[in-house]
Image (cartoon, coloured by chain):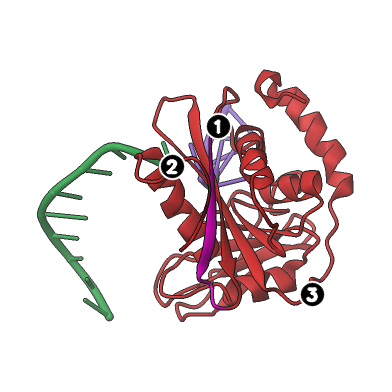
Chain colours: A red, B purple, C green
DNA sequence: GCGACAG
DNA sequence: ATCTTGTCGC
């Protein structure tokens, strides 16, 4: 399936089909390896730099970086981020020597109009446990959490069903939006993200992935899989 | 018709 | 998302 030639109406149909394959269930397996995925690109360019970082858990020390460059033509349309970023992430994924127990994707999971955010989309395609961690809300309603670190409220859909968590990852910073992608649920995704926060607002997996793809885009890091020495 | 709107 | 320097608040 070539996402580059899809129209938004066609992409909507695909999301509605994939939606039935998303599995929301508690994740209780022990985690020893966690991954972080993100994309970077130059404004107005069709080249995207994708990356997946592997980290030891619970230490959160980087183990390796998988970086790939790819051409994309699907535009950024709110609600359809997956059609723009998933293809490149799949390449980075296949390039990994070992797969992580759970992957944190920069974006939303089921906290989406059709419950098919990029984290759910990727998870279903790869049959892989995923969690969405976003910096802004896309869909849902919530009460602002207290300003102290760790405070959180629930992100709800129109029927008041839980979609995810609005988490104050650090004291007095804007909250982040955590939602299950695939093979995880609201509680376990929150627990895993809480254990992935260190000294910054964003969890280490996506924070390091973001740093990596930016370095890659600037030529500081090279394409391919690179183990950390 | 009017807001909202991941990256 | 990316482009950018200084500046404000704790």
The location of residue A62, given as percent across then percent down, is 51, 65
SS at circle 1: loop
Q: If you read the primary sequence from the N terminus, does the residue marked by circle 3 or circle 2 appear first?
A: 3
The chain that hosts pointer 2 is A
Residue at the extreme right of the image, as rendered: A20
Q: Using the rendered view, name the quadrant where residue A57 is placed.
A: bottom right
SS at circle 2: loop
**Residue receiving disc 3:** A29
Question: Few, some or many C-alpha atoms within 10 Å of disc 2 (few <14, some 14-19, many ≥20)?
Answer: some
Q: Which residues are drawn in magenta?
A: A59-69
* Location of residue A225 with respect to A151 vertically, above or below: above
* Location of residue A58 with respect to A174 vertically, above or below: below
* Location of residue A66 with respect to A229 vertically, above or below: above
Residue in the foreground of this view, choosing between A27 and A29? A29
Kindly identify the residue that appears in the image at 67 percent across and 73 percent down.
A32
Q: What secondary structure do most residues of the magenta stretch adopt?
A: strand
Q: If you read the primary sequence from the N terminus, does the residue marked by circle 1 or circle 3 appear first?
A: 3
The reply to whether dot 3 and dot 2 touch (C-beta < 8 Å) is no
Discs 2, 1: same chain: yes
- Is residue A108 shown in magenta? no
* Distance CA(mark 1)–CA(mark 3): 35 Å
Q: If you read the primary sequence from the N terminus, does the residue marked by circle 2 or circle 1 appear first?
A: 1
Q: Using the rendered view, name the quadrant where residue A31 is placed.
A: bottom right
The location of residue A102, given as percent across then percent down, is 70, 63
**Residue receiving disc 1:** A76
* Distance CA(mark 2)–CA(mark 1): 26 Å
Residue A222's tag is 2
Instruction: Give the label, 3 or 2, closer to the camera.
Output: 2
Residue in the foreground of this view, choosing between A31 and A104? A31
């Amino acid at each position: 399936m070539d996402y580059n030639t899809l129209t938004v109406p066609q992409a909507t149909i695909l999301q509605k089909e994939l939606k039935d394959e998303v599995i929301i269930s508690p994740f209780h397996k022990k985690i020893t390896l966690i991954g972080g995925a993100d994309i970077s690109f130059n404004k107005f360019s069709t080249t995207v730099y994708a990356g997946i970082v592997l980290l030891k858990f619970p230490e959160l020390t980087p183990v390796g970086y998988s970086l790939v460059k790819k051409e994309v033509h699907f535009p950024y349309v709110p609600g359809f981020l997956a059609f723009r970023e998933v293809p490149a992430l799949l390449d980075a994924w296949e390039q990994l020597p070992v797969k992580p127990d759970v992957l944190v994707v920069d974006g939303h999971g089921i906290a989406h109009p059709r419950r098919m955010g990029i984290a759910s989309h990727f998870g279903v395609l790869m049959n892989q446990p995923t969690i969405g961690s976003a910096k802004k809300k896309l869909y849902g309603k919530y009460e602002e959490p207290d300003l102290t670190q760790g405070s959180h409220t629930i992100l709800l859909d129109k029927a008041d069903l839980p979609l995810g968590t609005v988490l104050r990852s650090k004291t007095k910073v804007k909250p982040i939006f955590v939602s299950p992608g695939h093979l995880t649920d609201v509680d376990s995704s929150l627990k895993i993200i809480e254990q992935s926060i260190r000294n910054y607002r964003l969890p280490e997996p996506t924070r390091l992935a973001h740093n990596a793809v930016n370095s890659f885009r600037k030529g500081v890091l090279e394409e391919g899989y690179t183990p950390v020495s």
